[in-house]
Image (cartoon, helix red, strand yellow):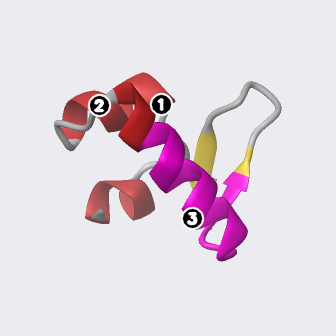
Amino acid sequence: MDKLYINDSLTKDEITTEYAFDVRQADYYISAGAYLGLFDRLETGSSAAR
């Protein structure tokens, strides 16, 4: 998850590829991180680490 803090933002596809997640898993972790306040959702549907 260190790449999430290095980059200003990652797309769902980049997260899926980087962490070998299924797209559904990436959606889950993005939503969970946003709920916990770890990520801010961008208008395009991707997330950025705080």
Q: Earlier in the sequence, mark 3 or mark 2?
A: 2
Horizontal arrangement in the rendering, residue 27 relative to residue 48 (left or right): left
Drawn side of residue 29 relative to residue 42, left or right = left
- Distance of label 1 from label 2 (alpha carbons): 10 Å
Q: Which residue is mark 2?
A: 22
**Residue stretch in magenta:** 26-40
Q: Which residue is mark 1?
A: 12
* Magenta stretch secondary structure, dominant: helix
Instruction: Give the x, y percent position of residue 18.
Output: 22, 37
For marks 3 and 1, give the CA distance.
Answer: 13 Å
How dense is the environment of label 1, judged by Cα within 10 Å: few (below 14), some, or many (20 and up)? many
Q: Position of residue 7 (x, y in %)?
A: 43, 49
Q: Secondary structure at mark 2?
A: loop
- Distance Cα–Cα, label 3 vs label 2: 16 Å
Residue, far bottom? 36
> x, y (%) of residue 10?
48, 38
Is residue 1 shown left or right of residue 4?
left
Tell me the quadrant of the picture where the C terminus can be found: bottom right
On screen, residue 4 above or below 42: below
Dot 1 falls on a residue whose secondary structure is helix
Residue with the mark numbered 3: 33
